[in-house]
Amino acid sequence: MPARARIESLADPESFREFDRTLVSQDPLKFETYRKRLKEARRGTGAGEAITTGFCRIDGHAAVLLVFDFEFMGGTMGSVVGEKIAHAFEEATRRRLPVVSVTATGGARVQEGMLSLMQMAKVAGAASRHGQEGLAFISILTDPTFGGVTASFASLGDVILAEPGAQIGFVGPRVIAQTTGVIPPKDSHQAETLLQAGLIDLVVPRAELRGVVAYLVGHLRTQEIIANFGRSGKNGHAERPAALTLGKVGKAGKSKPLPAWENVGIARHAGRPTARYYISRMCTQFLELHGDRWGGDDPAIVGGPAELDGQTVFMIAQERGATPEEAAASHGGMAFAQGYRKALRLMRLAAKFGIPVVTLVDTPNAQASFESEQSGIAYALANSLAGMSSLPTPIVAVIIGQGGSGGAVALAVADRVLMLEHAIYSVISPEGAASILYRDVERAATVAEALKLAAHDLLKLGIIDTVVPEPAGGAHSDPDAAADTLKVLLCQALREISAVPPQRLVAMRYDKYRHIGRVGVGWRSLAGRAIGRAAGFVARLVPKRSRPEAETPAP
């Protein structure tokens, strides 16, 4: 697709203003036939170079657009192409604008030798500086995208899109076959293969590309202080659904707690609403992004930007599947390392723009298998815990079903933790605990009570902050009412923390988890020692009064 046609397909009519139109390549190495090839390319395409850059609007959103033209010497990147890319990123940084790039390239321009190769460092550095300023970069990979462009700025997008069937990679399949003697699989470099490998976010048909790009540039931007969550109703108050009983909205609700084992049964009910259902009911828009940019994409965890009550949030959720087929595809919500790496990548993307993160937790546990161990599940969980503890943006976690062990807490390190009334949150399943402690799974019901895994118990222990009331019989009896209730309390929680400066928010989050578990005699003793140390410190600061010397006793 010629560069001009591509620009017309993405930019608003008559909004494109080109940069560096007169900047054209020379022949720095006096390479044979290079000048002739350049003249032919200019005559054939009507373009001055293999890339066109400029300012535009996309659905009303200002942006800087970079578009390659493969018909110009295979879209190769020489010194001038690198210069135009770097300058475009610098202009975007100066103007505080997002960048959208569309690549179609064979890679570095051989006729410029090492000067061409060095453009990789130039453009990667410019893209990095742009990103450090909290500005969005959407990279679109078309057919073909190879070599030094793929291995530099094109792979640094906050979101990476590709067109169906596009051939993408560092070294093309023909070159691999000729240099190594090994013929790659037929679909080795296709966009769909990269999506499965977790290396790109979405494969988007050309007809839908403009809408997806417009959504991203409209939502991936630094957020203003969000103080109006849940205030979209009349008179500035949240609209409360008719199905919601106002008297039940509160930290503990008004209903009588059920026996723990009965809660376990409700939390595991096959008809209980899944994460995707809650997202679709609570959010007006949601764009799912894919991949950990490392080695895979796990359907057990879904995530991406969404609109909640008119505000942008990142929804990140464990999806167990609503049908047997969906459950098999998402392995029952038990994620591999790739899922947690994807979740952390999306959280960091949200933090870049100050967008709040909402996690929905529903998993029996993280994936427990040899394959999971080999993929680094322990490291992925540890990094998720550490990453969330210091993420400089508001986080609200919601336990919507089963919150099992490390697989659950790895998505629940949050400023506010909400828990549906009949969900469960436990160090291990009751059956697992009964097996370990008594070697008798039949004692699971008794152990469930002792584990204090129900919402009301966890509220008393300070593990969670809010119990979300459910319809009589559980969320599956009236999913719409359950989602509407959750939305009200979720917006309330976001409203409470949204105006807190990021540094203070992180400090408060650390303090929150630093003090969990300080109960009982042992902790009272520790507190006593702390008070004693403080008193000693104060005593050292206060000057001692001079005391009269003791009189020498009379002989």
Image (cartoon, rainbow, N blue to C red):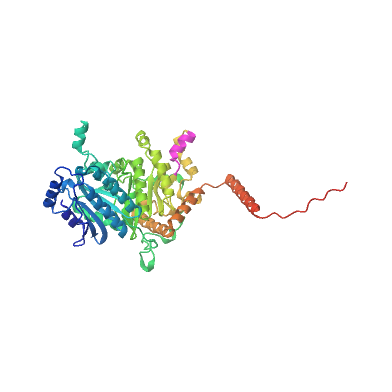
> Which residue lies most toward the top here?
181
Q: Residue 361's x, y, as percent?
A: 38, 48
Magenta residues? 426-438
Tell me if residue 512 comes above or below residue 175 in the rendering. below
Q: Position of residue 38 (x, y in %)?
A: 15, 48
Answer whether residue 428 is magenta in the image.
yes
Residue 391: x and y in percent read: 41, 51
Q: Can residue 29 be seen in this view?
A: yes
Q: Which of 304 and 483 is in front in this view?
A: 304
Q: Which of 314 and 261 is in front in this view?
A: 314
The secondary structure that dominates the magenta segment is helix
**Quarter-of-image position of residue 212:** bottom left
Q: In this rendering, would 249 be left or right of 156?
A: right
Q: Where is residue 534 in the image (x, y as percent from the top left)?
A: 61, 51
Residue 284 visible within the image:
no
- Place residue 236 in its image quadrant: bottom left
